[in-house]
Image (cartoon, rainbow, N blue to C red):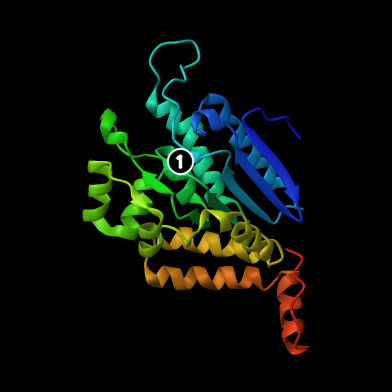
Amino acid sequence: MAEFKTILFSIENNVCTITLNRPDAYNAFNEELTTELQDALKSAENDATIRCVVLTGAGKAFCSGQDLKDAPTGGGKRSLADSLKRRYNPIIRRIRNMPKPVIGSLNGVVAGAGCGVAFACDYRLAAEHVKFVEAFINIALVPDSGALYTVFQSLGYAKAFEWAALGEPILAAQAEHVGLINKCVPATNLESETKAAASRFAQGPTKTYGLVKRMLSRFETRSFDSALDYEVWMQQLAGTGNDYSEGVKAFIEKRSPRFTGT
């Protein structure tokens, strides 16, 4: 395992917790942090003992987006296209494509690319004081890292345009109401709620969670008819797993299943 400087990486009870750890900068993304986060997510995906991943932030923020003070390597003007292709989009894709559940435990402000990372998570918990902010418009840029796509899906055109064009925050309670997050909880309960959710996922049928993620990603761009065809394939794959056999056996024996994630 590589030593990380800008994140904390821990594993306990089949749950991997990745903590963005630049609290003095509100966990803003610099070159090092985006590189290490990609590496950490890859390690979590490849470790068969890890059955659930938690993403959170140290200090008062989850992530405040790109660190505008972080100068490009070699000086000069930053290529925004390069930053997205090389640094941010791989993070979003790795979270979305990871064949195990990823929980976003959102402890503080979520801004800029931090919104994209938060919304890429499969299960999103936010402390009640959290705000989701896209202030790109203040520097004449558009939202990126997939955030506007997710907001458009949940809020529709008019509200998504308002969020992007006016830069007004979405409060955690509002985000829960419109389906951007799963749960808005008191800050004092965030850790316990996160642990409970992570424990449940870590004891569940990991392979099947991965198939559900694949199905949902495909449904975003496919017709209902093609979704039915895709379900056939996914269900056949799910039925080849050991957890399916255990689930049926437990049902017949009237007990709780003991899933192994295989």
Task: Examine the rendering and report whether any part of residue 29 can be seen.
Answer: no
Q: Looking at the image, how many numbered discs can be counted on the residues?
A: 1
Q: Is residue 76 above or below residue 148?
A: above
Residue pointed to by mark 1? 114
Q: Position of residue 215 (x, y in %)?
A: 51, 63
Q: Nearer the viewer, residue 54 or 168?
A: 168
Indicate the amino acid at tag 1.
Answer: Gly
Q: Is residue 241 left or right of residue 74?
A: right
Q: Is residue 244 left or right of residue 116?
A: right
In the displayed structure image, the side of residue 171 where residue 53 appears, left or right = right
Q: Quadrant of residue 137?
A: top left
Q: Please name the residue shown 35% across and 62% down the image.
A: 178
Q: Is residue 131 visible?
A: yes
11 or 250, which lies in front? Answer: 11
Q: Looking at the image, which residue is at 61% across and 63% down?
A: 209
Q: Quadrant of residue 39?
A: top right
The picture places residue 226, in percent across and down from the top left corner, at 42, 68
x and y, in percent, of residue 138 in the image: 27, 32
Q: Residues within 10 Å of mark 1 (few under 14, many from 20)?
A: many
Residue 206 placement: quadrant? bottom right
Vertical comparison of 51 with 117: above or below? below
Vertical side of 238 occupied by 78: above or below: above
**At 77% across and 73% down in the image, what residue appears?**
258
* Residue visible at 52% across and 71% down in the picture: 231
SS category of the residue bearing label 1:
helix
Quadrant housing the N terminus: top right
Q: Position of residue 237 (x, y in %)?
A: 64, 68
For the C terminus, which image quadrant? bottom right
